Image (cartoon, rainbow, N blue to C red):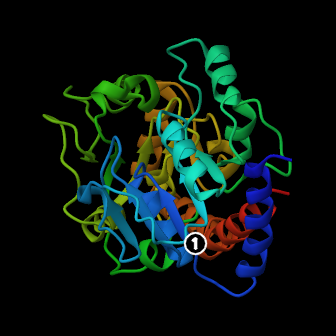
Amino acid sequence: MSSTASQQSIRSIMRRSYLSKVDTLNILTFCTHERYEQGLCKTGHNFYSINHGKTWNTDYGLIPANYQQIDIVPWHVNFDLILCHTSCERIMVAKQIQQLFNIPIMRHTHVLPDIRFDVQSQIANFNAIEVDHDCFISRYNMEEWGKNLSKTTSFIEHGIDTDFWSGGDSHDRENVCISVVNDWPNRDWCCGWKLWQQTVGFNSPDQLPIKVFGSSPGLSEPASSLEALREGYKKSSIFLNTSIHSPVPTVLMEAMACGCAIVSTDNCMIPEIIHHGENGLLANTPEELREHCEYLLNNPDEARRLGDNAKTTIINEFNLNRFVEDWNKQFFNVIKNYGK
């Protein structure tokens, strides 16, 4: 047995003993998805985010108190895990750090293979990079990357802070279709910019009543705060989602938690969450999407029913308590099994 293997075995034994006595972990990470990482911070652990490739954008949410951005890894901290939210060059940085700290790397994948390029090559390259544990945001996501559930592969579905999104003041809803997308015109391939334009009749005499939040120069600006975004959802009768290649947009689930009636494309993981006619309306053509929007604009009672059911779905199945519990279980399992 090599000295490295011996050190790894010793550290694994010590870690398992150590974990039985602590509740708070020290986790190295890289900023990727601010709103998602806000939810992760609810686990109560200490997150140290290495400034490599991206830093936290406060337009998308405030930095939690237990999330610290760092330029240099503090070697005096007893780190337990490295968490990467992408499979880019940050994995290589993580592997260099792993050699020094001898801790597991957990790769959490939010995206799908990019359909603009060769999908099979992406899947092969992804799986060629070995990590200690692969985690995904849904079973659908996991299987699209050629993975199956195992000791070293799992998925954790989104969790929404229903105390926040379902709380706040109640408003009389405006008969308007709200959408929330960043850099929309440049992300048509995944976010359905052209599909949205066709659906709402953008800049035409028969344009539907619309409201848009998100950083898209010339089109829209981000909400000034999460509270302002929540108010935008709660003031709108319909949330219109035209995503084409996204497992499930977080904003879609936030809007559901706020009680919006959902009109959405029917793809990826979305039909696992939204059941047509029960807690939203689904379609994939601009004609059908527009028909659904017009129907709900003209039938506020039905919009209210679908919105109430959407809110119930998030509260019961995609709440933050379940999300935090799933992540904590996974964190400790990955660390305990490292080196076995």
Tell me which residue sits at (42%, 76%) in the image.
Answer: 164
Q: Amino acid at mark 1?
A: Leu
Q: Position of residue 171 (x, y in %)?
A: 31, 74
Instruction: Tell me the residue that label 1 is attached to.
Output: 320
Mark 1, Cα crowd under 10 Å, few <14 / some 14-19 / many 20+, is many
Tag 1's secondary structure? helix
User: Viewed as shown, does residue 69 lie left or right of 33?
Assistant: left
Which residue is outermost to the bottom? 21
Tell me which residue sits at (27%, 44%) in the image.
Answer: 210
How many marks overall?
1
Q: Is residue 13 visible?
A: yes
Examine the image and state in which quarter residue 300 appears: bottom left
* 203 relative to 131, above or below: above
Q: Is residue 258 visible?
A: no
Q: Nearer the viewer, residue 114 or 269?
A: 114
* 60 relative to 212, above or below: below
Q: Position of residue 189 (x, y in %)?
A: 43, 22
Which residue is outermost to the left? 218
